[in-house]
């Protein structure tokens, strides 16, 4: 497996594995090559996999940042700004090497579209940067659709120790395919707002979320996210919108619809520059939410965020 580059190109391989032994061998080999080159190293994978890698590295694990992806990457939309860019931007000199496993067998059907878009958007977020991000995929537990999407979102594929270029690579097609229409939920509570109704929209969201069982800090998160998104609707989405709140599979869900259109595929995933005024709203929503789903098109934009009860 030879994924080290000496130039400034971004390197984004998918690693397909079938056993714990293969997973450990390939990931540890990947990290040891980075150690040999003096590269800063980070590993963000589901908890049990962290221990496989840590134990495989032995004493070399002391120089590696380990993060549980089921925590830091619960919402796929915050992995780029908080995990990947957070680490890469902290080490601006020379190549940085990261293992990131955002898709595991426990991901739900409602989460998966955001996961696939995340893997695709990594290519845009790191274009032209000296960063290598290896993304493992469990071929024995993930379905064929996930593996096929991985071949489209990664320009380099590694399987059984062999590396090859992907002939299916087309990350933009994956972003477009999972820009799925989010149908209105029939039994949701709905509130229409404009600039004068922003405070009332926040109060409505908090009251409905509390009625559905949200409490303490999660209520504060709901209020913050609704405030950011409704303000964006007024400023950029035609001056008005609708807010809906409902419960779904152990979460409170809030949804904002307006007439605007998101033209930047990395909106909400690009960290603000030092001194930047504004432009942080959607990223804050990603940070406080367990999941964010977005659909945008000529007819308008829908943003739906989930907060676990």
Image (cartoon, rainbow, N blue to C red):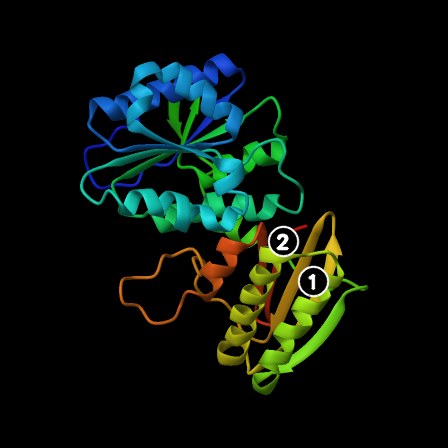
Q: Is residue 270 left or right of residue 200?
A: left
Label 2 sits on residue: 307
Is disc 1 placed on a helix, strand or loop?
A: helix
Mark yes or no: residue 2 visible.
no
Q: Toward which corner of the image does residue 25 lie, by quadrant?
A: top left
Foreground of the two, 239 or 204: 204
Q: Position of residue 202 (x, y in %)?
A: 61, 73
For image coordinates 24% across by 24% down, the residue present is 35
Is any atom of residue 177 visible in this view? yes
Q: Which residue sits furthest front?
A: 216
Q: Is residue 112 left or right of residue 99?
A: right
Residue shown at the point (43%, 63%) measured from the top left: 264
Callout 2: SS = strand
| Quadrant of the image containing the N terminus | top left
Residue 291 image position (x, y, % from top left)? 58, 51
* Crowd around label 2: few <14 · some 14–19 · many ≥20 (10 Å): many
Image mark count:
2
Tell me: residue 18, above or below residue 260.
Answer: above
- Residues at circles 2 and 1 in contact by the CB criterion of under 8 Å: yes
Q: x, y (%) of residue 285? A: 51, 60
In the image, residue 229 above or below residue 272? below
Give the residue furthest to the top: 21
Q: Nearer the viewer, residue 131 or 221?
A: 221
Q: Can you tell which quarter of the image residue 13 is in?
A: top left
Image coordinates of residue 119 in percent, x first then y, are 47, 43
Q: Earlier in the sequence, mark 2 or mark 1?
A: 1
Mark pair 2, 1: CA separation: 9 Å
- What residue sits right under mark 1 in the picture? 209
């Amino acid at each position: 497996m030879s994924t080290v580059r000496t130039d400034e190109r971004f390197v984004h391989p998918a690693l397909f594995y079938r056993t714990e032994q293969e997973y450990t061998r390939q990931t540890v080999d990947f990290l040891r090559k980075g150690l040999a080159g003096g590269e800063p190293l980070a590993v963000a994978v589901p908890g049990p996999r962290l221990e496989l890698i840590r134990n495989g590295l032995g004493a070399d694990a002391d120089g590696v940042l380990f993060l549980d992806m089921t925590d830091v990457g619960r919402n796929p939309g915050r992995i780029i700004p908080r995990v990947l860019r957070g680490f890469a931007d902290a080490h601006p000199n020379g190549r940085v090497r990261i293992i990131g496993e955002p898709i595991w067998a426990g991901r739900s059907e409602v989460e998966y579209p955001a996961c696939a878009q995340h893997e695709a958007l990594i290519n845009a977020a790191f274009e032209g940067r000296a960063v290598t991000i290896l993304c493992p995929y469990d071929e024995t537990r993930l379905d064929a659709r996930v593996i096929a999407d991985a071949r489209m979102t990664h320009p380099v594929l590694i399987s059984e120790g062999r590396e090859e270029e992907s002939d299916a690579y087309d990350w933009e097609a994956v972003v477009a395919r999972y820009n799925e229409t989010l149908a209105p939920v029939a039994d949701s509570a709905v509130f229409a707002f404009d600039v004068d109704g922003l405070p009332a929209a926040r109060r409505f969201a908090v009251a409905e979320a509390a009625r559905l069982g949200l409490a303490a800090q999660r209520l504060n998160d709901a209020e913050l996210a609704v405030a950011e998104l409704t303000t964006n609707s007024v400023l950029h989405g035609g001056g008005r919108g609708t807010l809906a709140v409902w419960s779904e599979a152990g979460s409170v869900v809030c949804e904002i619809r307006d007439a605007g259109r998101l033209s930047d595929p990395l909106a909400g995933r690009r960290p603000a520059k030092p001194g930047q005024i504004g432009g942080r709203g959607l990223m804050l929503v990603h940070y406080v939410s367990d999941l964010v789903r977005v659909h945008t098109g000529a007819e308008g934009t829908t943003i739906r965020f989930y907060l676990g009860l």
